């Protein structure tokens, strides 16, 4: 993963802090693995407290804004903390890949 992508992820985290209950953030996918193309998106995992429709829209808007500023599409994958801890999401293949290859931000 290059420094620019990590800086973009940190900026996203900074803009989200205080606006949503963010427990964990990881960057994963092709940019972390090193097989991204110039037009690859930046996959970001967000584990949040609650997830209302308003919060989901806010995450999308902030991700778009930060990505636009840096000429990159940010693709947030958002899981509510309770669904990860007490639900079936922790057994999903996507979650397992994120935990294995994801870089904590």
Image: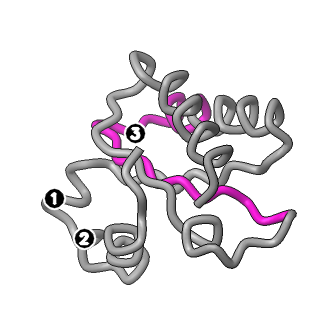
Tell me the tag on residue 90: 2
Tell me the tag on residue 51: 3
The quarter of the picture where residue 100 lies is bottom left
Q: Which element carries disc 3, helix, strand or loop?
A: loop
Identify the residue under disc 1.
85
Tell me the tag on residue 19: none
Q: Which element carries disc 2, helix, strand or loop?
A: helix
Q: Which residue is drawn at 54% across and 22% down?
A: 15
Where is residue 78 drawn, in percent x and y?
46, 51
Q: In the displayed structure, does residue 11 sit left or right of residue 20?
A: right
First in sequence, mark 3 or 2: give its number. 3
User: In this picture, which residue range is highlighted in magenta?
Assistant: 39-58
The quarter of the picture where residue 87 lies is bottom left
Which corner quadrant holds the C terminus?
Answer: top left
Q: Which element carries disc 1, helix, strand or loop?
A: helix
Compute the Cα span from label 3 to label 1: 15 Å
């Amino acid at each position: 993963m290059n420094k620019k992508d990590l800086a973009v992820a940190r900026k996203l985290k900074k803009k989200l802090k205080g606006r949503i209950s963010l427990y964990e953030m990881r960057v994963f996918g092709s940019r972390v693995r090193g097989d991204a193309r110039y037009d690859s998106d930046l996959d970001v995992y967000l584990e949040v407290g609650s997830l209302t429709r308003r919060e989901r829209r806010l995450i999308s808007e902030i991700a778009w804004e930060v990505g636009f500023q840096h000429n990159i599409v940010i693709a947030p994958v958002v899981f509510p903390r309770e669904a990860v801890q007490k639900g079936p999401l922790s057994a999903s293949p996507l979650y397992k890949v994120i935990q294995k290859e994801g870089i904590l931000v």
